Structure formats: C-alpha cells, structure tokens
Amino acid sequence: MERAILLQIGDTTTSKRKALREFSDKALSEFNRLFEERDFCLKFMDFHRKVYSATKKNTSFNAQVICDIERRVWKSKGKARRITAQFNIPRNCKTFSAKSLDFVELGLYPRNRVAVPLVKNRNWQRYHDLLAGGWNCKTYGLTSDLQIVAYLNKEEVGLPPKRNILGVDVNSKCFAISVVSPEGKVLHQDYFGKDIWVRRKKIFERKGILRSHFDRGSSYAGKALEKTKRDEHNFVKNRIGEVVRDITDLALRFDADISIENLHRFSPEGRKFNREVMRIPFFTFKNNLIARCADKEITLNIVDAWHTSKFCNHCGAVGKGHDSSNYALFRCKKCGVLANSDRNAGTNIAIKSLLERKDVLTDKTFQISNRRVPVNGLVRSDEVGLSQVAVQHSNHSDGMPTTFSRG
C-alpha cells in the first residue's frame, strides 16, 4: 500500500527559499528538455545512456534525482507545467528534529544540502500517526510551489473477511451503495454525492461562458476561468473525501467489506460516452477509498465490471440493462422486475464479490433467487485471477431455488 501526504514548509531564510526555487525551476526545465530528447529511443536504457552524461553536466544534480526525472520523462505523455522532484533516504535525503521542530534535509546538489522545517499542522500530525502505525517513509518530494511530499508505504496484511459486502456503483451523477449479506439479502441501499454533479454542471456552464469571452480577448475572463477551475478541483476533492468517509463508516456499521468495479478511463462506446466517463471522479475516489480502507482495516475488493449493469440481481438473467424508455430504470425482460439501474448495479457488484470469495466458491453455493433463468459469464476467470470459476445456473428439477455455483 502506498500513499502521499503534503507537508508545509515553515519559516526559513530567504537564501534557502531561493535555492529551493532555483532547483525546482531547473528540474522542470530539464524535464521538458529531456522529453524532446526521448524521440527515437526504443528502450529506457537507450534513453538513459543518451541523456545521462549531458544532464549531469548541465545540472549537477545528484545521480538519484537525474534517474528519477529520466524515468518519469520516459513514462510521460507530454511536457510538464510543474514537477515534484524526489529524494531518497538515506543517500539523498534525511530527517531530524531540533528545537521542537522537524526538519527534512534535501540534497539539491552533491555538496549542497538544505534543511527545511515543517509546519506542525493537521497533515504533519497525520504523517506522524501513520509512522507510528507501521507506515514507512523512504522518499520525500519537493513540489513546484515549494512544499514537501512524504511518500509512505506499508506492507499489505490480509484481513479476515467481514460478513457482508458493500457494493459501490460509480456513475456520472452519484455513488449508489448496496449492502448484501452472504444469503443474498439486501440489508441497506443509499446514494452519496448527488450534489457533486449538480454543482459541477453549473461550473461547466460558467466555464463555457468564460471560455467564449476569453477567446474574444477578455483578460478578466481568463483569470476568472483559472479561478473557476481551482474552485472546481477543490470542491470535488473535498466532497469525494467526505463521501469516502461516509461509505467507510457505513461499512463498519454493517460489518461489511467494500467492493468497486475495475473501471477503465476510455471505452470503445464513442466520444460522447467517454466525455461522460471523464466527468466521473473515479480515480480520485478510488485512491481516497484505498487510503481510508487501510486506516479503518476494511478490505477493498476490485471486481470485474463485466455485465454489472446488465444482469438482474433478482433472477440472474442477462439483458441489455437500462430500460429503453428511461435510462434510470432497469427492466428485466425475463422476470419483469423493475428497479433503479444504479441500485441494481451496486447490488450486482456486491454479489460478484461474494461469488469470488473462496469460502463461498469451495464450501457452498450462493443463493440468489427462486427463479430458473440461465446465466452466462458473470465472473470471468481471466479477469479476477481465479482458476475454473464461472457463474452458472443450476437447473434443479426438484423445485430448489436457483443458485450460482462453481462451474
């Protein structure tokens, strides 16, 4: 497990801030220069041999900083507007305490180390709590706005599975929650984050107006547009954090592990569909959820997204998914059940996670309904990493309920 915490630099001398600023600007300039040098290199080692000596001569950076910049340039898709230079302990960085302050000493150049004090705020306290909780920090970063990033990691420890599963369906307008027991009973359903889309829709409209004025040459519109983008980013970040807190609290309340889909950013569905997906803050949500689950000792499961919105959690039939007349409704053509499509998908995610549990697959079957409808390929072994696993219909002639079992 990995996470990063932003630590604020405290009061320091003008010469130290100048040295940090010069280093940060030089690192950004070198990053963009190396990106132009990356062409015609088929392998990273070819790129490294091509640029390392020149970079060492041009910047006098430490070897570790140069190699880190090279690796990120190799993975980058374009030039950068800002960069976080990383320093590894113990070769290029160290920490110490003096006069009731914590310091991080960064090796900017081979013979130039700068010790910067850290502000004792909430992030600093959180950072120390994580270190006391078994997290390790071997790398620090210097951002373009002169703040320190602490990169922490911790070895994952397997947690005993909780009784129930909380499935989360992430869509363009909200987060649909369903808590399902091993017996297939839905214990609780809810929605979170509905206000995110309402607020962002208004922001999109304002950004469109400001962009049109900016294109006509209005300097005020350009400044207002940048401010609107910052406000949107901060709002989404804060609300996602609150939503994740509420979801994890709900999971603890119902003694449940959490399951989400393995969503992809792009889809072959088309440009319009991709624009909708890009408006979903899924990756911000996922990273936040991973960190919060680690803190509260909740297992987070990533399940295959195959057919989660297309099969009926009442009878198991796979269909086209949403109702043709109303996108928000799910209508099953086999059993006729009518349900909210988001709640149906959230329940299906929880069901898939239950089906992937080893104790469910090896010791017993999982009861899902009392109807007999064929089901094909709800859990794919090549996606979830399990051998000989399928979700099938057990066609009993003795009136027993429909079950999904090991194929």
Image (spheres, grey):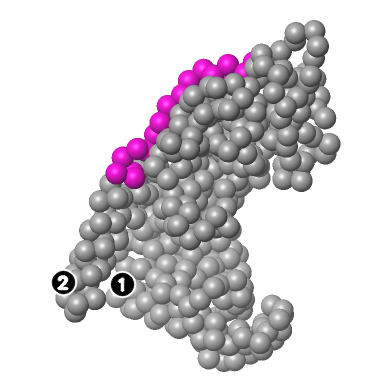
Q: How packed is label 1: few (under 14 Cα within 10 Å), some, or many (20 or more)?
A: few
Query: Residue 85: image x %, image y %?
Result: 49, 71
Q: Is residue 122 left or right of residue 94?
A: left
Give the answer, above or below, for where 11 lies relative to 162: below
The residue segment tinted magenta is 180-198
- In the depicted view, which residue is nearer to us: 359 or 136? 359
Mark 1, secondary structure of its residue: loop
Is 213 inside the magenta-drawn segment? no
Name, please, the residue furthest toward the top. Answer: 398
Q: Taking 183 as reference, is 20 above or below it?
A: below
Quarter of the image for the C terminus: give it.
top right
Side of 378 relative to 362 (left or right): left
- Measured in 3D between alpha carbons, the distance from the residue under mark 2 to the one under mark 1, in whole angstroms, is 35 Å
Question: Which of the numbered marks, if any, corresponds to residue 13?
Answer: 1
Lateral position of residue 229 relative to residue 144, left or right: left
Q: Position of residue 217 (x, y in %)?
A: 19, 79
The residue beneath circle 2 is: 220
